[in-house]
Image (cartoon, coloured by chain):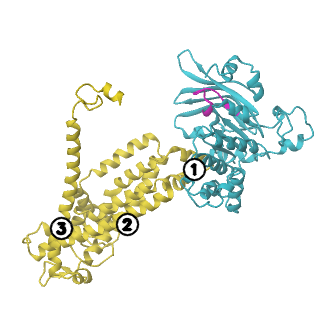
Amino acid sequence: MAITSSTTNGGGRPQLAATSRRLGERAIIGALALAAVISVLVTVGIVVALLIPSVEFFSEIPFAEFFGTSEWAPLFEPPAFGVPPLIVGTLSTTFWACLVALPLGLGTAIYLSEYARPRVRSTVKPVLEVLAGIPTVVLGYFALTVLTPFLRALGWQVEIFNAFSAGVIIGILLLPTVTSLSEDAMTAVPSSLREGSFGLGANRFQVSTRVVVPAAISGIIASFVLAISRAIGETTIVLLAAGQLARVSFWPGESVMTMTAFIAGTGSGDVPTGSIEYKTIFAVGLTLFVLTFILNIISIRMVRRFREIYE
Amino acid sequence: MDPTSETPPAAPSSPVATGGGLATLSVEDRPAADALPLDQREVVFDCEGVGVRYDGKRALRDVDLRIHANAVTALIGPSGCGKSTFIRCLNRMNDLIPGASVDGAVAYHGENLYHPQVDPIEVRKRIGMVFQKPNPFPKSIYDNVAFGPRVLGMKDQLDDRVEQALRRAVLWDEVKDRLKEGALGLSGGQQQRLCIARALAVEPDVILMDEPCSALDPISTSAIEDLMLSLTNEYTVVIVTHNMQQAARVADMTAFFSVDQGETGARCGVLVEVDRTDKIFTNPAHERTEAYVTGRFG
């Protein structure tokens, strides 16, 4: 008590009180909180904007018809609203994209992280990043005017618009994403683990596949998830190269319509606002959103499970 | 084809068998299987003029050193004296560092370790290594020990092999009920013993230990020192340590490394002297060694 009274300086204000009121710091906290609130609000806003026309759509077209019938012709007379052809189209192009991007991307990442000399790495990485910078519209025309004719020249009678060309080129588009994120994850694996396994007489391939990849698995899966989500959402390439023919077909040489191609194609047409055709766009958009969302949740779960095992 | 396969790793007990009756001046009072004096035992490593450069900069030069079988050889010295660099020459770990180059000659059981036809993977099968920081793989305890046998194709009776290795590393009783659990859940000392078990599981000839106790508490340290002493019955052990008491406790031979400052100011590690541990600590031949072991320097 005596100490307290002797050290306070007259006015009763403790010497350790803040000299200024730190307005600047509060302003910064406010600005940061505002940024967080805005991004949450925008997300909520998008979902609401997607939900309202979709709810109106489903009050006219029952769920059973939308998901249970397999003819898609909303702009025709009489219209048909069976979404499965679009889902099949999306899954088909996504499948080919993943078949290209995941193994090739992981292989490239292993090579760059575990095998390549620093000089090779510093050449290959920028080249891959250039690939990421090519506009998708260019890639779409590449699929249509180079890859498809090439497939035909090889003797495979694919349709002019086909799921395979579009999917493969989406895979090329995603290659830098998978490579870069997976390589980061592998480079982050401590070199003590590599030394430990080399010290036991493992060769480089065994070190890569049995130690580094398992230790980096959560980052690798995260890169896969991002790639798959982007393949599902990719629009321009499928619009240009996969066609506009909605049908339930997994055959790679045939033309398919994806959900994104329908949205972009119809949205750029002249459907009147408020009409059922207009609401169709939102119903398909919501389906796309839910599909991507479920996929993300599954993969986050997977990453967590692997994490528990490995870290 | 492979030169290392011409000479199978010598049975570590052979000098004992031949010299059992010649109980001359035993340097240690352990009832170990080694009645021969150190300098008459088989030479495992014979190093002549060994040096290392990183990106052309010399880190170590002119090391002449013999390492004998069934003994613990300690490498001591101040930071930057090249003792870790040297131990990594013995199983070609320096190959993994870009820009590192080794000169001089390292003979392992009489065979040039750096012969162009020698496969570093064959070398590391026989010469195991334990590192400064425990580095168990983020896998189960069992999978950690089984890793070496699996990559080397020694897959028969894997369970027995894992158990034997864990028993020799004095870890079995602590982990036998949780072999499938993650190795990262073990304490630091247990992790380091796991790394030793992992190295033993491939039945090497030599175990190199690079400051194996520097990240551990005194109790774990003492457990690992006991373990090292028991290993010399079957293995040759080389240990790098910055802890002189540890060298005095476990080592039969001690090599003292120090740093030379060249005319250009470049620092470079050198071997000052190597001798029996009791001689290094009580009656060293060099002044620099004496200054270091009495704590006046380094």
Between residue A230 and residue A142, name the one nearer to us: A230
Q: Percent position (x, y) of residue B266? A: 54, 20
Q: Secondary structure at mark 1?
A: loop
Residue B80 magenta-highlighted: yes
Judge whether A156 appears above or below A184 on screen.
Answer: below
Residue at mark 1: B136
Whichever of callouts 2 and 3 sits on the residue coming sooner in the sequence is 3
Magenta residues (range)? B74-84
Q: Please state if B34 lies on the left or on the right of A145 as rendered.
A: right
- Which chain is cyan in the picture? B
Residue type pointed to by label 1: Pro
Residue B101 magenta-highlighted: no
Residue at mark 2: A298
- Which chain is yellow in the picture? A
Residue type pointed to by label 2: Ile
Are the residues at dot 2 and dot 3 in contact (C-beta closer than 8 Å)? no
Q: Chain of mark 3?
A: A
Q: Which mark is residue B45?
A: none
Q: Secondary structure at mark 2?
A: helix
